Image (cartoon, rainbow, N blue to C red):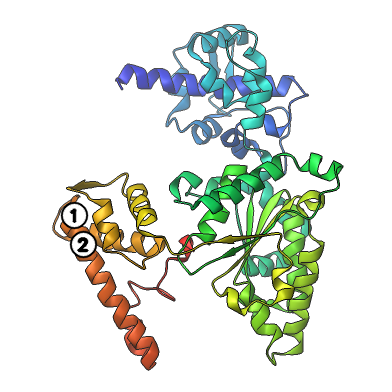
Amino acid sequence: MSDADLETDAQRAVVEFVLTAAVYTEHREFDPDDLPPAYRAVFWEGGIERPLSPTEDTAREATGVGDPWAAVSELMFTDHDSFSGDITFSDRGIAKEWFRERADADLLEANPVLAKCLEDEIEDVDYERARERNRPARADRAVIDDLLEEYFDEDEEEEMLDLVDVHTPSEVELTLDDIVLTGEQEGEIHKIVKAIEHRDYLADIGLREIGKLLFVGPPGTGKTSVARALARKLDLPVVEVKLSMITSQYLGETAKNVEKTFEVAKRLAPCILFIDEFDFVAKTRDSDEHAAIKRAVNTLLKNIDEVSLINDEVLLIGATNHPHQLDAAAWRRFDEIVNFPKPDRGMRADILQVVTREMDIADFDPVGLAERTEGLTGSDLRLVLREAVLDALTEERTTLTQGDLLAAVEDFEERDTLKNLDMIEGDHDALVAGGSDFPGDGHDHAHD
């Protein structure tokens, strides 16, 4: 791209930002869901208050243009207050015409405010479609933080954030396209997407027992990744909790904190509530644990019964690495069971194709590599590739070879064997020594 093109892009970005602020301020029928997320982020202060006053600082943050005023200062319709930093238009009509000549349908589909303003002037622009595609304000970090702050006092909020993690859609890096799914997994995800899109219809016909999924499979097979990627696809925040955390002595009354977990989900609804380590329920019910912990588990089961995708707009996803430890009472609380097996050879080859898309690999043979990685999960394969990349970098190379990958597989298997022997023998010092490669249980939980 030439310097002239870059200059024009910067001008257009700043003019779009200032024009959007002016139109939004003037037309009170717009609400925060009409603003692009980057614009909401700079104007949000417990809400969006009119008038919106674009400044050099907010324009820089919203558009990524390093010097917004310098970018548009030569345009005859722009003005600037050097004291406040405000950027304005001396003639909005000319500004709108200038922007219209440089805008297209794709650009306007990402900006409902200007899509509404220009839908009659630019072909294939539809305001309702743009608004539907725009990420809603309820999924923004600032809005989520405000809701939590409003609902809990400072000490309670800090305690709750020790128990749960809340991720916004924009904070999720993986998409469903980055994850290799089985046919069953794709089918279940498609069904739940349709259920969320048509939840009003489901309520009308009385079909309310839907939207509680249990993900079952070994560590590293994608359970957490799919839950997060689904949240990104649906533009929903995801509330994550590990059940073992309810036993923490630092979390106060455990049953109360379980209640609060569901309160957070309902407060942030529509959202996904992802409950990991669900087998902890069965282990606790069958043990002689403290009565307070058992009360917490009973509270959990009661809240699962009561939460609803249709009534509360909360999609519940449980996950377990140990399905054999669940009893009938746990199983029947879910309307769909989704299996996450270790990938077969074909899936491993597909995973390798996906995760190496941005890598330069000479003589790459994903099928051959898949044949050498029997028993490895998607998370394991990512670890193998990471090690191959790091080993190549020590030799000042950014181009990998098939040999690098095969050597990394062999190294991974050797260390994994040593780790498993160490766990059997109980030599914890040896496990710590290998901890740089295998944190925790040896799997990258970001991909569980």
Residue 194 x %, y %: 67, 42
**How far apart are the alpha carbons under marks 1 and 2?**
6 Å
The quarter of the picture where the N terminus appears is top left
Q: Are marks 1 and 2 in contact (CB under 8 Å)?
A: yes
Instruction: Give the residue drawn at x 33%, y 16%.
Output: 4
Residue 448 x %, y %: 49, 64
Residue underneath mark 2: 406
Residue 106 x %, y %: 52, 21
- Up/down of 29 relative to 396, above or below: above
Q: Is residue 364 visible?
A: yes
Residue underneath mark 1: 402
Instruction: Give the residue drawn at x 82%, y 51%.
Output: 311
- Up/down of 88 relative to 305, above or below: above
Q: Secondary structure at mark 1?
A: helix
Report which quarter residue 405 is drawn in: bottom left
Horizontal arrangement in the rendering, residue 292 relative to residue 380 (left or right): right
Instruction: Pick whichever, 11 or 188, lies toward us.
Output: 188
Q: Count residues near mark 1 (Cα–Cα under 10 Å), then give few for <14, some for 14-19, many for 20+.
A: some
The kind of residue tagged 2 is Leu
Instruction: Give the residue drawn at x 47%, y 49%.
Output: 174
